[in-house]
């Protein structure tokens, strides 16, 4: 088994952890959306209170990259697994 297949076998065993990471990233989006709405409405209740808070809430957009890559890897893994099962079923028939 080559390194590529070893990696995907390892990753398939960690899919629940990957989904938990995606969920956390999505839940972090809630305060970011409130902050962003406050910016758009120029209310100043959450946004522009402190530059560090603004920096962190702006940075939430960047961690979405992890979620996007993770979802792509999960989709690839599941498709690869489905194709493998179809090949096995075809051989058995």
Image: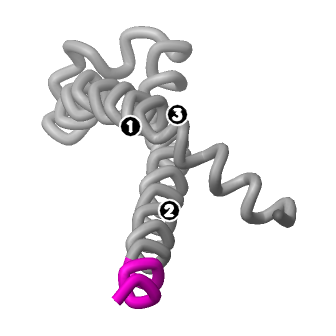
Q: Does the magenta portion include 91?
A: yes
Q: Position of residue 2 (x, y in %)?
A: 85, 65
The mark closer to the camera, 3 or 1, is 1
- Circle 1: element type: helix
Residue 32, percent from left and from top? 31, 29
Instruction: Give the Cα separation between the discs numbered 2 and 1.
Output: 13 Å
Comes first in the chain, label 3 or label 2: 3
How far apart are the alpha carbons under marks 3 and 2? 29 Å
Q: Name the residue under label 1.
A: 19
Q: Which residue is drawn at 43% across and 55% down?
A: 71
> Closer to the camera, 1 or 57?
1
Residue 70: give x, y in percent of width and height. 50, 50
The residue lying furthest to the front in this view is 93
* Distance in Å between CA atoms under marks 3 and 1: 21 Å
Identify the residue at image location x=46%, y=88%. 91
Quadrant of the snapshot with the C terminus: bottom left
Looking at the rendering, the stretch of residues picked out in magenta corresponds to 86-93
Q: Earlier in the sequence, mark 3 or mark 1?
A: 1
Relative to residue 42, is residue 88 depicted above or below? below
Which element carries disc 2, helix, strand or loop?
Answer: helix
- Could you classify mark 2 by the number of other residues whose Cα lies within 10 Å: few (under 14), some (14-19), or many (20 or more)? some
Does label 2 or label 1 sit earlier along the sequence? 1
Q: Say if 31 sits above or below 83 in the image.
A: above
Q: Residues within 10 Å of mark 1 (few under 14, many from 20)?
A: some
Write the residue at 52% across / 16% down.
51
What is the x, y in percent for residue 92? 40, 83
Side of 31 where 59 appears, left or right: right
Quarter of the image for residue 52 reads top right
Q: Disc 3 designates what residue?
A: 59
Mark 2, residue position: 77
Answer above or below: position of 55 versus 36.
above
């Amino acid at each position: 088994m080559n390194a590529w297949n070893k990696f995907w076998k390892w990753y398939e065993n960690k899919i629940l952890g990957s989904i938990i990471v995606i969920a956390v990233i999505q839940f972090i989006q809630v305060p970011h959306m409130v902050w962003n709405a406050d910016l758009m409405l120029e209310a100043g209740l959450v946004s522009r209170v402190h530059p560090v808070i603004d920096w962190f809430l702006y940075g939430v957009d960047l961690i979405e990259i992890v979620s996007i890559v993770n979802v792509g890897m999960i989709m690839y893994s599941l498709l690869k697994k489905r194709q493998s099962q179809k090949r096995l079923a075809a051989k058995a028939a």
